[in-house]
Image: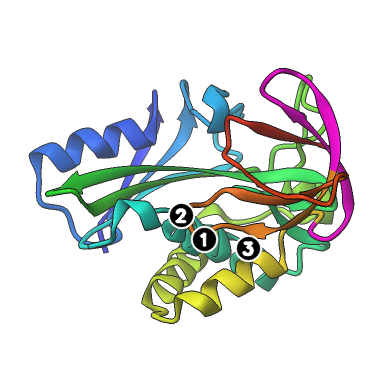
Amino acid sequence: MQIIKLNAIDSTNQYLHDLVAELALEDFATVTASYQTHGRGQRATTWQSEKGKNLIISVLKNEINLNPQRQFLINIVVSLAVFATLKSLQIPKLSIKWPNDILSHDKKIAGILIELILKKNTIDKAIIGIGLNTNQLNFKDLPRASSLKSITGVHYDLDELLHKFLENLKHYFSIEDRDQLWATYENVLFRKDKPSTFVDRKGVSFSGIIKGVSQQGKLIVKTEEKSIQEFDLKAIQLMY
């Protein structure tokens, strides 16, 4: 397996993206860095990480051959691979906050950023970026962030963690039963079937209950008016 280890880089996703444009890389080729200066997350957020303390990786998945309308399936596969890796370490109270934040209790410990490469209107490749808070203990101005070491008191070997995750990623990509993947993902959704507060793009708050995720990756919410509505990532934010 191709694993490229870097000391510091602006973005492992960008580095791998540039590399893919120049070289034919193996399936699950991985770039990992001790430090990332411009890590990105969902909603154009940045990812804070102390040097050498967290798992920062980008993984290439080749030959996906998936309709772009079904791209959320990739998100499910990756989220479940991270979830399974952490569950094997007995990290408590794990859940997936839609679309792909991994939580322990209500603290974020991992984020995912997936970039797709299309070929003839089909998803050909994916660059899968993972930021896993591992041995870092301080998260300035991030009250919702935590790490594996903060939760368990255990110091984790980043190389062992990487290989555990890659094994799980390969496993979940090998599952052909999409309904099974979807059901497994929805079963561990944060605050599913619980009354919750949301804020829409206009800043208006409302109450609702998460019922699942649509085939297009939209969050399905039963509102106070008992109507079922679907929201994309830019349209809604869960407050907790």
**x 61%, y 26%: residue:** 48
Kindly report the distance in space between the C-alpha atoms of the residues bearing marks 2 and 3.
16 Å
- Position of 173 relative to 212 (above/below): below
**Residue named by callout 3:** 83
- Res. 200 in view: yes
The boundaries of the magenta stretch are 192-207
**Residue named by callout 1:** 76
Image location of residue 163, percent across then percent down:
46, 65
Work out whether mark 2 precedes mark 3 in sequence or the reverse, and give the earlier one.
2
172 relative to 197 in the view: left or right: left
160 relative to 135 in the view: left or right: left
Kindly report the distance in space between the C-alpha atoms of the residues bearing marks 3 and 1.
10 Å
Query: Which three-letter amino acid code belongs to the residue tagged 3?
Result: Phe
Quadrant position of residue 111 = top right
How dense is the environment of label 2, judged by Cα within 10 Å: few (below 14), some, or many (20 and up)?
some
- Res. 240 in view: no
How dense is the environment of label 3, judged by Cα within 10 Å: few (below 14), some, or many (20 and up)?
many
**x 77%, y 26%: residue:** 142
Work out whether mark 3 precedes mark 1 in sequence or the reverse, and give the earlier one.
1
